[in-house]
Image (tube, rainbow, N blue to C red):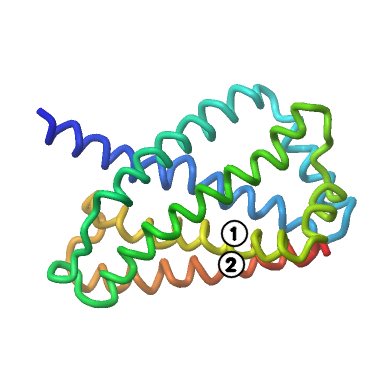
Amino acid sequence: MAGNREFFNRRLHSLLGVIPVGLFLMQHLVVNHFATGGEESFNNAAHFMESLPFRIFLETFVIYLPLLFHAIYGLYIAFTAKNNTSRYGYFRNWMFMLQRVSGVITLVFVAWHVWETRVQAAFGAEVNFQMMENILSNPFMFWFYIIGVISAIFHFANGLWSFFVSWGITVSPRSQVISTYVTIGIFIALSIVGVRALTAFI
């Protein structure tokens, strides 16, 4: 019974990491990338997202609760998992370890980012270009955001590889090699989008 529960929790953890959390990450990166078009471009995109109907409901049940489960169960996995050198080999074992490390870094970053933006917005602050410009004008915070964003993107892209395997999408060794190159491409592409957005604010 306990084994079945753990199997279910791991499958749910994997699924939520891609849908909806991973999709939200990509959407968030795209909205932030509007900053490369200037202050007005970003503010219009941000205000559009804030004006969506049922926003509080969507944020709670599509973003925060799935993210909370993924984070809590992810910490359990990170601190109980053992490296799989015999199963995956040298490269994939490194990816296995970096997945756990990036998950912890991403959790710290996301918690801080939510505090600086969504929580402050609840107290009356406006989430706009100027807010992010003020945050990122601090060199320490800029590099904290760079590391956090890249860590989040790596965690998502590398997590896709595990998702494809655990859900039976990539079964053969060849398909797993192809999946490795695809997910590396996703990591590079999204990292360019994320870093360009951050540098646009400064």
Residue nearest the observer in this picture, 108 or 191: 108
Q: Pointer 1: residues within 10 angstroms few (<14), some, or many (20+)?
A: many
Q: Secondary structure at mark 1?
A: helix
Question: What type is the residue that disc 1 sits on?
Answer: Val
Q: Residue at x 77, y 42 (%)?
A: 46
Question: What type is the residue that disc 2 sits on?
Answer: Ser
Work out how far the residue at label 1 is from the one at label 2, CA to CA, in angstroms.
Answer: 8 Å
- Locate residue 10 relative to residue 172 in the image: left or right: right
Q: Pointer 2: residues within 10 angstroms few (<14), some, or many (20+)?
A: many
* Quadrant location, the N terminus: top left
Callout 1–callout 2 Cβ contact below 8 Å: yes
Q: Which residue is mark 1?
A: 149
Q: Position of residue 198 (x, y in %)?
A: 73, 62
Q: Which mark is residue 191?
A: 2
Q: Residue at x 80, y 64 (%)?
A: 200
Q: Secondary structure at mark 2?
A: helix
Q: Residue at x 53, y 35 (%)?
A: 63
